[in-house]
């Protein structure tokens, strides 16, 4: 149910023919819909199908409210992961792994995506299919296309939904899902259903809402399409020496596993991944908190969801479902409050750093800016903002 601001849709061309000129966002909603209809016909859809498809569409204020209310991603990794990873979800995940063992075995053979990865998404997105969302999908997609915040992401999904409608796989009035237009047990957008939908149960249809085999195999197909490297690890908890050069940590810096090993990095349980794999040391709450080694497949998670805390939690949860223990929290410095984080981002912007929006979310850009300032000030450069750093700035 969490919005995935992913690269699901191909970037729109900078050069379009006049016949396919894109409908501008904003303005009167009904006029916008009429323009979308004309664009759909110009793309080759029949006028009759277009009229049927858009006949019931309405602007949805609930969708806009949900889009502006993602405060959950302001939580720290510890807060968020503890909130969403319950023993009940772990138990249900293991039960589903046994129930659909043959499907997971086939999935791993065909795609090289480990079962824990799909189980974690299945759990976090819809609680194993129990909570798939009650937003009218077409209304949400058109509302978000009309809104000028991120129309480039949602516009292609409207036309993909139209294609599904023409194939008999989408109902403008009855298809429902998450507020951002995703549908099914693992929450896929229309374009991804077209590209990666798999008939896993052999009934001749791709039904992501009620068929776990269809949903799981489609999700695995999408991950492979996003660049998942077959049969490789994605995240592993580690221990790190206290004298590690913290400026080497972070997802934007990689060394081979063998190099990290020479620097004193150790697997908390078992062995590190293959010695020649590139990997990054990930410290979601700084050098005093949990530590992980992030392998290339971890980066694919950001194609599914752009939130650092969601991605880290989903990847860690996948390891738990495959037997990893609860992470060692350590004793991290307290997280900044929402107001303090916005104050920090404002100060970082004033110093010339690109932190994106001043939104109180510790994302990739803010972490990079924090690490740069820590290095400048001679502080341990672990990218975790502290009250001391805020005071020094």
Image (tube, rainbow, N blue to C red):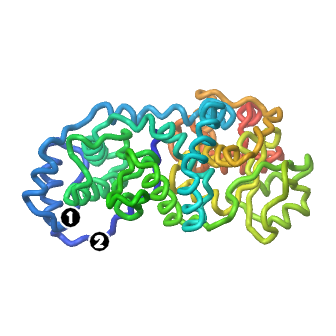
* Residue 63 percent across, percent down from the top left: 33, 36
- Between 310 and 322, the residue placed more toward the observer is 322
As rendered, which of 369 and 91 lies closer to the eye? 91
Around disc 1, counting alpha carbons within 10 Å, would you say few (fewer than 14), some (14 to 19), or many (20 or more)? few
Looking at the image, which residue is at 60% across and 35% down?
89
Residue wearing tag 2: 15
Residue 182 location (% of width, % of height) = 38, 47
Q: Quarter of the image holding residue 210?
A: top left
Residue 376 at least partly seen: no
* x then y, percent, for residue 21: 20, 64
> In the image, is 300 to the left or to the right of 372?
left
Q: Which residue is mark 1?
A: 21
Circles 1, 2 touching at the beta carbon (< 8 Å): no
Residue positioned 66% across, 47% down in the render: 367
The structure residue drawn at horizontal position 66% and vertical position 37%, both measured from the top left corner, is: 77
On the rendered image, what quadrant is the N terminus found in? top left
138 above or below 245?
Answer: above
Examine the rendering and report whether any part of residue 56 can be seen: yes
């Amino acid at each position: 149910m969490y919005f995935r601001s992913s690269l699901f849709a191909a970037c729109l061309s900078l050069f379009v023919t006049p016949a396919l000129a894109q409908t501008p966002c904003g303005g009167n909603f009904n006029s916008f819909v009429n323009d979308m209809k004309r664009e759909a016909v110009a793309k080759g859809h029949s006028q009759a199908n277009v009229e049927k498809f858009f006949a019931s569409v309405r602007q949805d204020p609930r969708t806009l409210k949900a889009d502006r209310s993602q405060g959950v991603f302001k939580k720290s990794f510890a807060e968020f992961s503890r909130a969403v990873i319950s023993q009940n979800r772990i138990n249900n995940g293991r039960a589903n792994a046994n129930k659909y063992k043959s499907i997971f075995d086939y999935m791993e053979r065909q795609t090289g995506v480990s079962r824990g990865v799909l189980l974690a998404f299945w759990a976090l997105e819809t609680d194993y299919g129990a909570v798939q969302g009650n937003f009218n999908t077409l209304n949400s997609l058109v509302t978000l296309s009309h809104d000028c915040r991120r129309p480039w992401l949602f516009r292609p999904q409207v036309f993909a939904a139209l294609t599904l409608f023409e194939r008999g796989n989408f109902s403008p009035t009855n298809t429902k899902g998450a507020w951002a237009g995703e549908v099914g047990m693992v929450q896929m957008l229309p374009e991804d259903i077209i590209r990666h939908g798999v008939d896993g149960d052999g009934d001749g249809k791709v039904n992501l809402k009620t068929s776990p085999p269809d949903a799981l195999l489609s999700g695995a197909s999408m991950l492979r399409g996003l660049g998942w490297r077959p049969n490789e690890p994605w995240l592993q908890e580690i221990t790190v020496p206290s004298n590690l050069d913290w400026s080497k940590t972070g997802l934007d810096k990689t060394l081979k596993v063998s190099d990290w090993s020479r620097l004193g990095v150790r697997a908390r349980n078992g062995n590190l991944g293959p010695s020649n794999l590139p990997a990054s040391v990930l410290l979601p709450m700084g050098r005093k908190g949990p530590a992980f080694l992030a392998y290339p497949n971890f980066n694919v998670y950001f194609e599914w969801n752009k939130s650092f805390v969601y991605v880290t939690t989903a990847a860690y949860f996948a390891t738990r479902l495959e037997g990893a223990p609860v992470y060692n929290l350590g004793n991290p410095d307290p997280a900044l409050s929402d107001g303090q984080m916005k104050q920090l981002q404002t100060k970082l912007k004033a110093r010339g750093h690109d932190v994106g929006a001043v939104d109180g979310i510790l994302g990739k850009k803010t972490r990079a800016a924090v690490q740069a300032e820590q290095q400048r000030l001679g502080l341990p450069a672990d990218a975790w903002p502290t009250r001391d750093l805020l005071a020094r700035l």
